[in-house]
Amino acid sequence: MLSALIHPSLRDCRRLFLRNYEVMINIGVHDFEKRAEQRVLINVDLYIPLEQSTPKADQLSEVVDYDFMRETIARRISKGHIHLQETLCDDVVKAMLTHPRVRAARVSTMKPDVYPDCEGVGVEVFQLKEEA
């Protein structure tokens, strides 16, 4: 995977990531998908300017906490059934960008159990925060 850090406005950033966060959620457009939860793997990359993410006193308050990513995803999932992975990705990336230290975010989701002949099917979205 090519890193988004090649984007000029992200060259001074640190990448914080959450890999293959496995959740059971109610997602899908088919009737059988609406009746039961299914396994989804979620990946998040947050791009945070070094001046806002380089600890000087080795304290958690100086950086973006990993819990922010997990709690943000949990809040979205708790809202109920989602038809499309695109909707889930869009909602999560927008929520990630609400953190004042985050300049950009990449979110991907994958349903690993849909087809027996592939690792999974999924969606990925990248968004750069609008410059103020």
Image: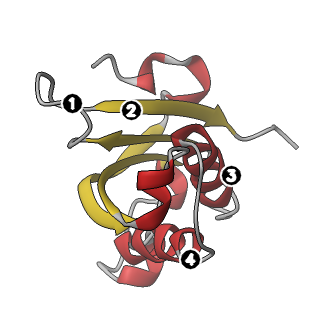
Chosen colour scheme: secondary structure
Contact between marks 2 and 1 (CB within 8 A): the answer is no
Q: Residues within 10 Å of mark 1 (few under 14, many from 20)?
A: few
Callout 2, which amino acid? Gly
| Separation of marks 2 and 1 at Cα, in angstroms | 12 Å
Question: Which one is closest to the eye, mark 1 or mark 3?
Answer: 1
Q: Residue at x 20, y 43 (%)?
A: 113
Q: Position of residue 36 (x, y in %)?
A: 38, 66
Question: Which one is closest to the eye, mark 2 or mark 3?
Answer: 2
Q: Earlier in the sequence, mark 2 or mark 1?
A: 1
Circle on res. 122: 2
Q: Nearer the viewer, residue 81 or 93?
A: 81
Q: Residue at x 44, y 24 (%)?
A: 4
Contact between marks 4 and 3 (CB within 8 A): the answer is no
Looking at the rendering, which quadrant does residue 24 occupy?
bottom left
Question: Which one is closest to the eye, mark 4 or mark 1?
Answer: 1
Q: Which residue is mark 3?
A: 94
Secondary-structure class at tag 2: strand
| Separation of marks 1 and 3 at Cα, in angstroms | 29 Å
Query: Would you place residue 32 above or below residue 30 in this image?
Result: below
Q: Which residue is mark 4?
A: 75
Q: Earlier in the sequence, mark 4 or mark 3?
A: 4
